[in-house]
Amino acid sequence: MIASGALGSILSTLVAGFLSYKQFKADQDEQARKNKESEYDKLRKRYDEDEDEIDKLRDKVRDLQDELDKERNRNRKG
């Protein structure tokens, strides 16, 4: 009986350790997923902001090109 009690105690400890490890691993995986989502969100926001900046610069370039074209046409006529 003493042996079976000791065996049960060892088995119980092993099962508890295994379950603790599984929970620890699940928590680690969840934290890794959250970190990836956070990084994605930051990069996506930065990408969108940069895309807006590119659009603004493109508009400025077009406006300046239009102004230059008008001046060149005026200089050819005049």
Image (cartoon, rainbow, N blue to C red):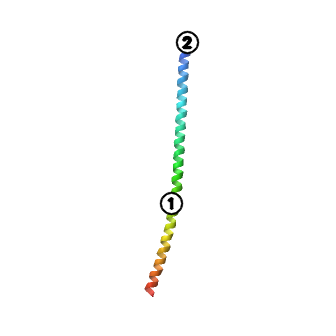
Whole-percent x, y for residue 16 in the image: 55, 26
- Give the residue type at disc 2: Ile
Which quarter shows the N terminus? top right
Residue 17 marker: none
Of label 2 and label 1, which has the lower sequence position?
Answer: 2
Residue 8 placement: quadrant = top right
Q: Residue at x 43, y 85 (%)?
A: 76
Q: Secondary structure at mark 1?
A: helix
- Give the residue type at disc 1: Asp
- Position of residue 19 relative to residue 45, above or below, is above
Disc 2: which residue: 2
Q: Residue at x 55, y 19 (%)?
A: 9
Q: Residue at x 51, y 63 (%)?
A: 53
Q: In this image, 15 relative to 78: left or right?
A: right
Which quarter shows the C terminus? bottom left
Disc 1: which residue: 50
User: Are there few (<14), some (14-19), or many (20+) residues within 10 Å of tag 1?
Assistant: few
- Gap in angstroms between the C-alphas marked 2 and 1: 71 Å
